[in-house]
Image (spheres, rainbow, N blue to C red):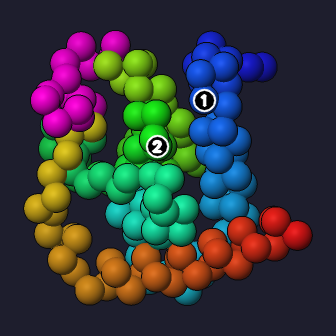
Amino acid sequence: MVSFTEEQLSKDCPDCVEQFRLIREIINEATFKDVGKLSCHVLCIAVGELFEPKFKIKHGYYTPGLQHSWLIDRYGNIIDLYPWGAIGGPMLIARTIVGILSNYETPKGDSFMYREDNTLEVLNNPKTRKDADIAKAELARLLEAYKT
């Protein structure tokens, strides 16, 4: 089944759908066994840096009060690598859908659902950086294997 969102994104920005599928595939193959604490922050730093400059790494809150990190692609779509309250892996969320669901947008471009705030304490924790580097190395190996 192809969802409405996937159909729209495939027309508007086909490369972002393909990029998302690649990211989803390597994340689903990863074990992250050497990562101390896997989190949305660790995954977003790892993937965002691995695929730089295609994504902007965002940190802040998912809905009021839940610390979170996500990626924004060059079209403004959200890639939520570690969704809150969901079973499953990464999600690609069309920017227009996030705007409709939230019915509120700030001048910074974040929505009610995803509100940017780079002052999260977890971002200053050296363990977060170390775990992100370990995760990025594993994902880079999987990406190279995927390309061959």
Main SS of residues in magenta? loop
Q: Quadrant of the N terminus?
A: top right
The picture places residue 70, in percent across and down from the top left corner, at 38, 50
Residue at 22 percent of width and 80 percent of height? 125
| Amino acid type shown at disc 1 | Cys
The residue indicated by pointer 1 is: 13
Residue at 66 percent of width and 19 percent of height? 11
The picture places residue 100, in percent across and down from the top left corner, at 34, 13
Is residue 60 positioned above or below 99 on the image?
below
Q: Assess disc 2: are there few (<14), some (14-19) or many (≥20) residues with their C-alpha within 10 Å of its C-alpha.
A: some
| Tag 2 secondary structure | strand
The residue indicated by pointer 2 is: 73
Q: Are marks 1 and 2 in contact (CB under 8 Å)?
A: yes
Q: Is residue 100 left or right of residue 86?
A: left
Is residue 69 positioned above or below 123 on the image?
above
Say whether residue 109 is magenta. Answer: yes
Q: CA distance from mark 1 to mark 2?
A: 10 Å
Q: Which residues are magenta?
A: 100-113
Q: Is residue 143 left or right of residue 145?
A: left
Residue at 46 percent of width and 82 percent of height? 133
Q: Answer yes or no: is residue 47 visible.
A: no
Is residue 135 positioned above or below 47 on the image?
below
Q: Is residue 143 left or right of residue 87?
A: right
